[in-house]
Image: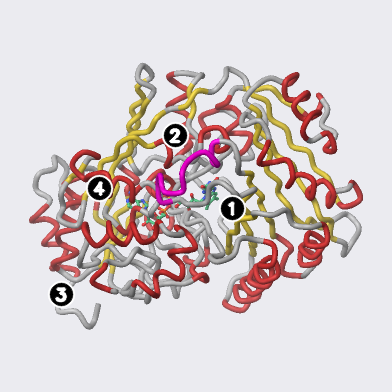
Amino acid sequence: WATSAHTPEDFLQCLTLHAGNSTTSISQVIYTPANSSYSSVLEFSIQNLRFSTPATPKPLVIITPLHVSQIQATIKCSQKHGMQIRVRSGGHDYEGLSYVSFVPFVIIDLINLRSINVDVENGTAWVEAGAIIGEVYYRIAEKSRNFGFPAGVCPTMGVGGHFSGEGYGTMLCKYGLAADNIVDAQMIDVKGRILDRESMGEDLFWAIRGGGGASFGVIVAWKIKLVHVPSTVTVFTVNRNLEQNATKLVHRWQYVVDKLDEDLFIRVILSAANSSQKGRRTIQASFNSLYLGGIDNLLSLMQESFPELGLVREDCTKMSWIESTLYFAGFPSGESLDVLLSRTPLTRQTFFKAKSDYVMEPIPEVGLEGIWERFYQKEAEEAELILSPYGGRMSEISESAIPFPHRVGNIYKIQHLVYWEEEGIAASERHISWIRRLYSYIAAYVSKSPRAAYINYRDLNIGTNSKEGNTSYRRAGIWGTKYFKSNFNRLVHVKSMVDPTNFFRNEQSIPALSSW
Ligand code: FDA
């Protein structure tokens, strides 16, 4: 800021001047460090404490618009006064890109733009970007128990980031990703124009469904296509440790999981828990499943395709689809559906680092044993690998239908996660170094050239633009092809058309052609 000729006051004056159309005065939705609620507004939705330390750069202003004209004014005034914009919907970005920048910046926090209109007759809904996914599920179920939506498991994620970064959950084998089920959108571009699918054109509409919204503008709302769910579904979680054959079961799971009936989703969560015997850690594989049907059918399907797990009737619970969203979010049975409306983070906020991988050939048992060895290391006290199955609908959709390219040929995706409680750089470095070592070890068993990654599990270690967000096509291609493979080129083409001066930029934004 010190190097700029502009001051925050100039910026605020500009906002007042340009946000005149709204019935609410913009001053009611502006927070500067002088406001007593600035810190609570900033910190409220931060998930990863790595980006909430005294050293983390803070925004000069936070705007929580009630009206699109206030977003338009913010875009205009940020350009005029040399500010960058960070757009935040649910704040779940793994690397804090929605609320941290190393150049003078403002946050547009969409928390107030979160209305949801469900149209059961047409099987669609308009959802404002600041809504959380739990609210979306709740409002759909309120209108009909036979509709649902195939998005993620954590109810507090914002749909602005989640859908523009693709978004998946327990119904991906049946219906694909959240972004596969978007039929229209409303966004504001760099010129401050309000665009819908027709006026933005098919290229830009393609790009924002998974290419990361932050590179292209501010998404205000999505129109989604609802999907059919049966009146009752079945869930189970079967835990097995190494003494209970976990290695062989995980090994076998890899051979069946992408060929299962598309109504059946079984993911595996691998973790290391401290056992009651002092100093010993137990490796656990948790088989966690949703079946879009009844218990009898599920048992016969499991008998046919994965009898080794030994699933029995007592492991299974019948419930409605909406109750299953609570089950997967970790709520105890009998919890009121109203918890889906709460934006308060479910789990305690903690420090964490995540990475992702795609598996195209089963990992041999000896490879799995090498993972267990790393789970016994000190830093892995709170670590997990989440293995999410592909196949079904995911293999039918073409690699270029939307920017997400990881379709046919992938058996499952791995999310690597490590959490820690201890503050400070040393603790952070130790845990990040552990996950990087695990990532190097797994390299032999996962996709190569490129080693693919999932954009919603943002990972700045796979490559970045400069801290100021300036970049070159070549530099951005390092991380861009991991997330998007050859779709990266089309994203660059769209970016060059809609934001040629690269105004909307961050450490992993799509570059414009002028920066080649
Ligand atoms: P946030 O507001 O932090 O935004 C993320 C990115 O999108 C930023 O770059 C931001 O600028 C941009 N953005 C946000 N709103 C925008 C808008 N309106 N217009 C333009 N750009 C916008 N993923 C998944 O697929 N399935 C899952 O089950 C889970 N589960 C999960 C659990 C937990 C606890 C966390 C922390 C994360 C996940 N995720 C996930 C990852 C999640 O999908 C990812 O972090 C999303 O980007 C979160 O979207 P938010 O809007 O909450 O993030």
Which of the two residues, 436 or 45, is positioned nearer the viewer here? 436
Residue at image x 40%, y 47%? 402
The label on residue 6 is 3
Q: In this view, does 479 lie to the left or right of 311?
A: left
- Structural distance between the alpha carbons of marks 3 and 4: 23 Å
Q: Earlier in the sequence, mark 3 or mark 1?
A: 3
- Structural distance between the alpha carbons of marks 4 and 2: 19 Å
The label on residue 22 is none
Which of the two residues, 486 or 417, is positioned nearer the viewer here? 486
- Structural distance between the alpha carbons of marks 3 and 1: 39 Å
Q: In this view, does 1 lie to the left or right of 288?
A: left
Residue at image x 60%, y 44%? 390
Q: What stretch is highlighted in magenta?
A: 393-403
User: Mark 2 is on which residue type?
Assistant: Glu
User: Mark 4 is on which residue type?
Assistant: Pro
Q: In which quarter of the image is the N terminus?
A: bottom left
Q: Is residue 14 left or right of residue 46?
A: left
Tag 1, which secondary structure? Answer: loop
Residue tagged 2: 135
In the image, residue 240 lies at what x, y percent? 83, 45
